[in-house]
Amino acid sequence: MDVVLAAGEASWEAAAIREIEASASLRLVRRCVDVADLLAVSETGLATAALVTADLGGLDADAVYRLEHAGIRVAAVEADVDLCRALGIERTLRLGALDIVAQDAPAPRHQQHEERAALIAVWGPAGSPGRSTVALGLASATAAQGVDTVLVDADTYGGSQGQALSVLDDVSGIVAACRAANTGRAGEVVEQLLDIEENLRLLTGLPRADMWPQVRTGALDLVLGRLRSAAGLLVVDCGFSLEAGSGPAAHRNQSTLQVLEQADLVVAVGRPDPVGLARLVRGLHDLAEVLPGRTPTVVVNMTRASLGWREREIDAALRRLTGIAPTTYLPFDQPGLDLAAVSGRTPREAAPSSPFVTRIEVLARELVAQVGTPAVLAASGR
């Protein structure tokens, strides 16, 4: 196995080099001076493993994530196990046993020592189909059913959940959580959650769209993992774009793609008008390319009699064009949703008799049963 070494000024470096040179299974191809050098090597395909010191300057959760996803097995030598786990490093080695990295299978991402909550991603194409409204409605409904629910605003084109719930957004919850996780303080992630209702907590999003680079991929990976061990269910409000970036550089849509990949269930939201349906059809085809073999739960939002189309007509059109039938149709209750918006409350709290709330509560029960989340959970991790 070809390995690179990034030891900084660690005292074990010379001994590690001698051990690698004497090993029949390891071959040292480069000594990296810093993390930037290490990441550059990962793009060349020269190595399949990296032996590092856990306190290497600049080594954080995002760097580890990028290395692992580039096919580099990251192993920390003579390192503290807790520090390694905080950075997402699953392998720790001792001098005299470095060749174990050659026998080791790639470390599974999101490895946890506790039960993990299900993750429901709420996505929809461009054109404001009501992704955030549906995500908030679902999260509120599952919380009302006794499920300890966390709503995560991960829309990198501009978070809105904080504003919808009259939460001050001077400090972005998701940015603060990612910063903590990225520097090995994943235990502080849960501290960024805000109590909204009984059993419902919120991780606020980006108050400005230009802050998206601060939601780093590896850090978000740890944030989601920590939240899934501290709650009964995650509902994540995603951005609309599925366009991938070019090359290894960070891009604005990586958070959406990352959440969709990790989701146990994807809810795709669309509008029933001609423009909305056309975008939903194209979006479902794009989604099928991103998540091959997986079928989303399609929700048609904002249905209303004034369009003149019956649900069965929309159903037939979507079946014919996408092969997927909508799971539910959510009525457009303008007065109830307006009341919720201006009062900074969830639709369920502001207008409990709203037809929108009634229908989304039925959907929430179906989704909870589908992902296998217990109907009533203790407030774990709180």
Image (cartoon, grey):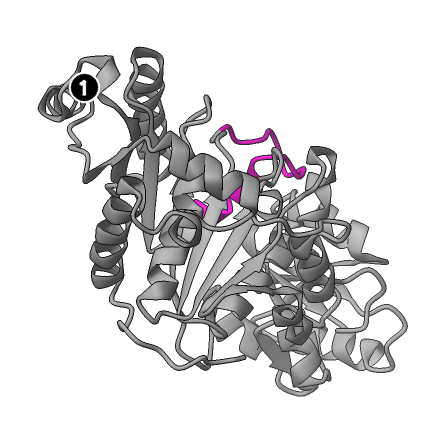
Q: Report the front residue among 286 and 236.
A: 236
Give the quadrant of residue 308: top left
Quarter where residue 164 is shown: top right
In the picture, which quadrant includes the N terminus?
A: bottom right
* Residue that appears at 43% across and 40% down: 133
Q: Between 156 and 253, which is closer to the camera in this rendering?
A: 156
Q: Residue at x 17, y 32 (%)?
A: 324
Residue 244 screen position, x and y as percent: 52, 31
Q: Is residue 366 left or right of residue 74?
A: left
User: Does 10 lie within the magenta span?
Assistant: no
Q: Secondary structure at mark 1?
A: helix
Identify residue for label 1.
Answer: 321
Crowd rating for badge 1 (residues with CA inside 10 Å; few <14, some 14–19, many 20+): some
The image quarter in which residue 84 lies: bottom right
Judge from the rendering whether residue 62 lies leftward or rightward of residue 230; answer left or right: right
Q: Amino acid at mark 1?
A: Leu
From where the camera sits, is residue 98 visible? Answer: no
Q: Is residue 67 above or below residue 192?
A: above
Up-down relation of residue 115 to residue 278 (above or below): below
Q: Nearer the viewer, residue 322 or 74?
A: 322
Q: Position of residue 43 (x, y in %)?
A: 65, 43
Magenta region, residue range? 243-260
Please tell me whether residue 31 is drawn above or below residue 339 in the rendered image: below
Assess whether residue 252 is covered by the magenta stretch.
Answer: yes
